[in-house]
Each structure stands twice: as structure tokens, then as C-alpha cells.
Image: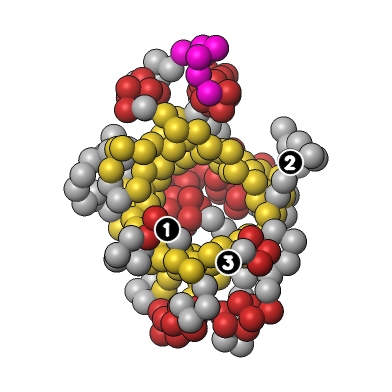
Amino acid sequence: MFDENRKYRHEFKYIEPEIRLRPAELRLSAFMQKDRHSGEKGFYSIRSLYFDDLTDTFLTDNIFGVDEREKWRIRIYDRSSDFISLERKMRKADMISKDSCRISTDEFNSLMKDRGEISDGNDPLLNLFIIGMKTKGLHPAIIVEYERTPFTANEGNTRITFDRCIRSSSELDGLLADRELAGRPVLETGQNLLEVKFDGFLPDHIAHAIENGHMHRETFSKYYLARKFSFSAVSRYTVAGRLRASS
């Protein structure tokens, strides 16, 4: 499943109280550039529809820390259907790689109705996803939405993002809806997520700007955080744990 020749990036995640994140954001703003998509607000919203297979493989792989794992999602920005992105994210330890392709509203609607068809005219990634739907039962599992404040630097191809107001929704048909979805926060009040991505190295001045002496790296994804309170996630986790314990 994983190509050794594929380019991977480091990705570190930290769940931190906002009282620590805000000073780090102010320090970074002195020498890092905002992502060009952040606009005048300085941030943008991301809404992602995550998929899993019939046995919740992507969820249980995350729970048990499987070294090589993947996940599929369809993503939009600022609640706009003008740009719909199909993405496959792969992880090896703390290294990540991502493939993406743009899909049309019609293609998205076909996928949601399980009517996607493999075609030479499709992007190869879309065909791969449709194969997964037909052979593994890939289906919508949860929506995750949040506001992202992004910083970038050429050194190390570094990207620092502050993801706030992370929430989940079971309105699986609401990805393209231009409205608030019914849902719930996935972190405790006042807690938000800092993500650090870079290629070969993290520049010292950036590392010093975000370090506060209390940071602990997290291993779980937003997808896991969004699903861990659902009955299906808990029940399947319990069953999977018992199976592994008895094997």
C-alpha cells in the first residue's frame, strides 16, 4: 500500500490551551507569512467529510497506533462548493504524505449516492477511491469542521497551523451546506490544536517560538477525536481490543 519512493513530511500535533497558543501565534506572526488563502481574516474554515470501510479500519488503525495507515476525506473551504478536494492521507510513524485531486459537485453527488464509476477520464486518485467504495465499502463516517490560522516558511518547507473550534457532525449529507451543522466540540473548552509540518528540518527560531516547556505530542487524529464519543466507535474499539487480546 505504501510506496517507499513517496515523499513524506514530518507532522507533529499538540493539544494546548488557548492561553499558550495565542502567545505562540503572536511570536510567529513577527517573522512567518500567513498562508495566501487566509485572506483578510487571517484564517479560513475547513469542513471535511471522512470515510471509513465496513470494519472501521481507519479508526481502529489509529486507536492501536498502526505504523502505516491511511484515511480518505473530501474537503471544502469556507463552506464553499467552488473547490471540492478529494484527499488520501498516508502516515508512517510521524511522517505523512498526501494525494489530492479536485472533484466537481456532480462527481461529489455521485459518490454520495454510491454511483461513482471508474473512468479513464477521471483523476487516478478518484478511480482509486471508487475502487475502495466498491471493494471495501468506503462510506461517509463523520464530518469535522474547524477554523485554521496558517503560517508558512520556506526554510524546511515549514507550515504551522492553529486549528480552533474543532467540532464534529453526523449530518453526513451536509458537507456542502452553507450553514452551521448540528454537532459537538471534540476538545475540552479552551483547548485547541497546533500542528507542525516540515520536510528535512524544523528551523530553530520557529521551534523556539512555539515551545512553551509544557508541550506533549499527540498521536490521535481529528478523525479519531471526532468519532471517539460515538457509540459505533466505542463498541467497535471494544470488540477489536478483545479480539487482539485473545489472539
Quadrant including the C terminus:
top right
Q: Is residue 120 magenta?
A: yes
Residue carrying label 3: 153
Q: Nearer the viewer, residue 196 or 236?
A: 196
Label 3 Cα crowd, 10 Å radius (few <14 / some 14-19 / many 20+): some
> Who comes first in sequence, dot 3 or dot 1?
1
Q: Mark 1: which secondary structure?
A: helix
Q: Mark 3: which secondary structure?
A: strand
Whether residue 56 is visible to the viewer of this picture, yes or no, is no
Comparing labels 2 and 1, the label whose residue is closer to the camera: 1
Q: Residue furthest bottom?
A: 213
Q: Mark 2: which secondary structure?
A: loop
Residues under numbered marks 2 and 1 in contact, where contact means CB atoms less than 8 Å apart = no
Q: Nearer the viewer, residue 203 or 174?
A: 203
> Who comes first in sequence, dot 2 or dot 1?
2
Which amino acid does the dot numbered 1 rest on? Arg
Q: CA distance from mark 2 to mark 1?
A: 26 Å
Residue carrying label 1: 36
Which amino acid does the dot numbered 3 rest on? Ala
| Residue in the picture at 64% in, 60% down | 157
Q: Is residue 231 above or below residue 190?
A: above
Which amino acid does the dot numbered 2 rest on? Arg
| Residue in the picture at 33% in, 60% down | 39
Comparing labels 3 and 2, the label whose residue is closer to the camera: 3
Residue carrying label 2: 6
| Residue in the picture at 65% in, 51% down | 96
Q: Which residues are magenta?
A: 117-123
Whether residue 114 is visible to the viewer of this picture, yes or no, is yes
> Who comes first in sequence, dot 3 or dot 2?
2
Residue 31: percent from the left, percent from the top? 52, 78
Q: Is residue 159 above or below residue 188?
A: above
